[in-house]
Image: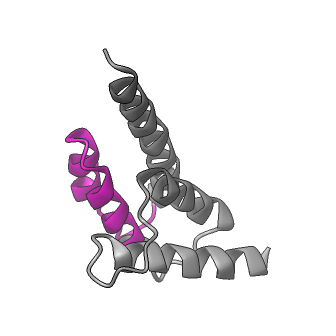
Amino acid sequence: MTDDREALIASWKRTRGHLDAARAHLMHRPGIDLSTTREFLEHNELGLAFDCMAHLADDLGLPHGFWQHMHRAAQEMRLYSDEPHMPHRKASASCLRHLAAASGRE
């Protein structure tokens, strides 16, 4: 296995760990269906899982820890961009906004 491939797999594992930790904050909340997120994670569609969780969490007032994990996942996937047509731009902007608000509350 090449070094690039090993680095990519390690990055996926770190990202998956952050998304799983963030997802744990959403579990057992009434009215939250995580089946789509689970499917994305099972198929290694990490960006789509990120988008889905950011959308689900948008109005839940989740703790800083949730948004920290989402932020770390976004950083690992290099989702932060000023490009207007970048995939995941809306979800990553939402993540930054919530991260700032959550850190201000705590």
* Secondary structure predominantly adopted by residues drawn in magenta: helix
What residue appears at the point 27 percent right and 70 percent down from the top-left corner? 87
What residue appears at the point 45 percent right and 53 percent down from the top-left corner? 23
In terms of depth relative to the viewer, which is nearer, 64 or 32? 64
* Magenta span includes 41: yes
In terms of depth relative to the viewer, which is nearer, 48 or 61? 48
Q: Quadrant of residue 52?
A: bottom left
Start and end of the magenta stretch? 29-55
In terms of depth relative to the viewer, which is nearer, 1 or 46? 1
Query: Can residue 61 be seen?
Result: no
Screen quadrant of the N terminus = top left
What residue appears at the point 33 percent right and 67 percent down from the top-left corner? 51
The x and y percentages for residue 88 are 32, 70
* Magenta span includes 44: yes
The x and y percentages for residue 15 are 45, 45
Residue 102 to residue 76: above or below: below
